[in-house]
Amino acid sequence: MDSRQTSHTEELKAVQTPVEPPQKVAQTPMPAPVAAAKEPLESVLAPGTFQQKPGAPRRTPARLIADGCAFIIMCARAYGGMLVAMGMLLPLTASIVTLAIFMFLPPSSGSNWSTLLFGAVFTYLGWLIVSAFFAYFASAEGANTRSYYMLRSRLYGLKARLGIIDGPDGRPQPMTLEEMQEAVGMEPSGNVIALREAYAAYAVINDILLDSHTGLAWILGIGYINSWSMIHRAEEALIEIEPLESVIGGAMHDQNCIQDSKMGNRHELLEKLTHAVKDLDPLALPYFNSQLIDRSRDALLNKVIQTTRTTSKRLEQLAQAVQKVDDSLQIDQQPEEHVEPLTERMPGSPEMQAHARIALREVRTALNEYRDNLWESLVRTRNRLLGTILLMGLVTHAMLSVAIMTNSNDTNRPLILGAAVYYLVGAVAGLFGRFYKELVSPSSVDDYHLSLVRMIATPILSGLAGVGGVLIGTLLYGTLLGVRFSVLHQLSIKEILHPSQSYYLLAAAIFGLAPNLLIKVLQQKAEEYVTSLRLSKSSETHSTQ
């Protein structure tokens, strides 16, 4: 009886005992490139996030404080950058607000200072508030979303090619030289300096997008230019260490970009590229420029013919010498004509291949520098136009402030309102003209919002031209017909809008179109840059740096 109870108790314990989960089988570690490819994209470029990754060490209070300070600095940079960007339009905005207060404020002799003061206070308060709401557009992602994601995609591809694995903080983990060589599939005899250059360039661009992804540099476009430049330096260095197939594929892409471009030395670059490919892999020559291939083949055939002739002469001399020794020996001195097909040529020596890779890298560097300079020219043109907007806004606000301050006993009110009407007519006329020209000249290349800046600058310049046109028209009218210039001071807002005074509005509209002639010159220059960029890329379906 006791034995049955004991066995029954043991069975109950066995049933109630929780089953331990099966232990995980140790998995074979993945190669570095595969592990890098499985890393999430956000680990490359995600700005300082406070979410803890699985397996990451626990954040200490000091680490949390450091992350908080970094976040505050990031926000301060974004806010400061947007303050500067919105400041380009601040004088013009102050003029609009001041004019609105002047129109609706009751006329009084002591309201001149208060009008300017209220206009300045409301404008600056709005500037501080609006800049906070639009601070996102002072980041790498917000300033130019398309360029940012193209840059991010290219960086992710570079990360996979280098076999980089990020640490818990989003930065690349340290790697030994042997690990770097194994990750890119490089032979021990490869160029170690080029390998280090590629990893150093990746580290720089990764730090830029982690630590400095907000601020004025992205609004001005300088951040994108510098980031693309570092991407290009890394890809150029990889030409000396990557497998042959990747190098040949890159050379085919470079040929397609160069052959239709406006580069002054494109023929020399194409010839250098073809000779380098011939030294690396002669079987790939049919995929390159046929004219250069024909030149290479002619040179090769001439060399073969010269060598054959030299050998034939030596054989004849040898046959004559043998016959002098033994007259009974008959030697046929006429060689049988036989041409063997040229089937394959082995690649050159390792030294020759190394020189060919260096030549391909030089070709890629020349192409990248050419395109980077074109992008930088577009950005500089846009930034100079932004400076023009600021200057014209300051001139407009200064003229309005002087007119208001000299408005004693409300005598200048009709003149100020009339000038505002002329300004508005000229601005609208110029804006319509600019809108039509932008509509008929579409562009498939991202111009870093240069066309938008032109649209903003046009009404400012056209408004000033409209006011100046009316003044010039009045002076000419008075000079030719003997009418005194004081007639301009006698015009009221009703007289300006009256049909009998419509020629003043017509003059403002005509002179408002004049700035389009100046902006047209900038547009033609920008279109030259865009055309050169479009011709120097291998596909019309996308535009990359």
Image (cartoon, rainbow, N blue to C red):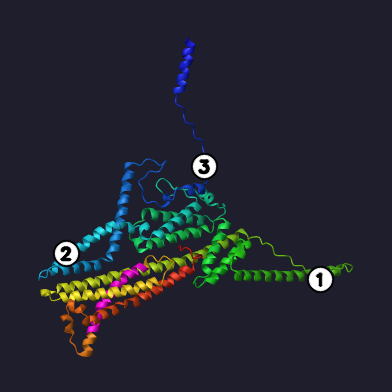
Residue drawn 21% across and 60% down? 125
Residue drawn 54% across and 49% down? 182
Residue bearing mark 2 = 118
Few, some or many residues within 10 Å of mark 1 (<14, 14–19, 20+) = few
Residue bearing mark 1 = 334
Residue 423 in percent (x, y) is at 25, 74
Label 3 sits on a secondary structure element that is: loop
Label 1 sits on a secondary structure element that is: loop
Q: Quadrant of residue 384?
A: bottom left
Farthest residue, direction bottom = 481
Distance from the alpha carbon under mark 3 to that under mark 1: 68 Å
Q: Is residue 486 magenta?
A: no
Q: Residue 473 or 331: which is nearer the viewer?
A: 473
Label 2 sits on a secondary structure element that is: helix
Type of the residue with mark 2: Phe
Q: Can the viewer see residue 517 in this picture?
A: yes
Distance from the alpha carbon under mark 1 to that under mark 2: 108 Å
Is residue 255 placed above or below 12 in the rendered structure?
A: below
Farthest residue, direction top = 1
Few, some or many residues within 10 Å of mark 3 (<14, 14–19, 20+) = few
Which residues fall within the magenta stretch?
A: 451-474
Residue bearing mark 3 = 29
Residue drawn 36% across and 53% down? 211
Type of the residue with mark 3: Pro
Residue 166 left/right relative to 326: left
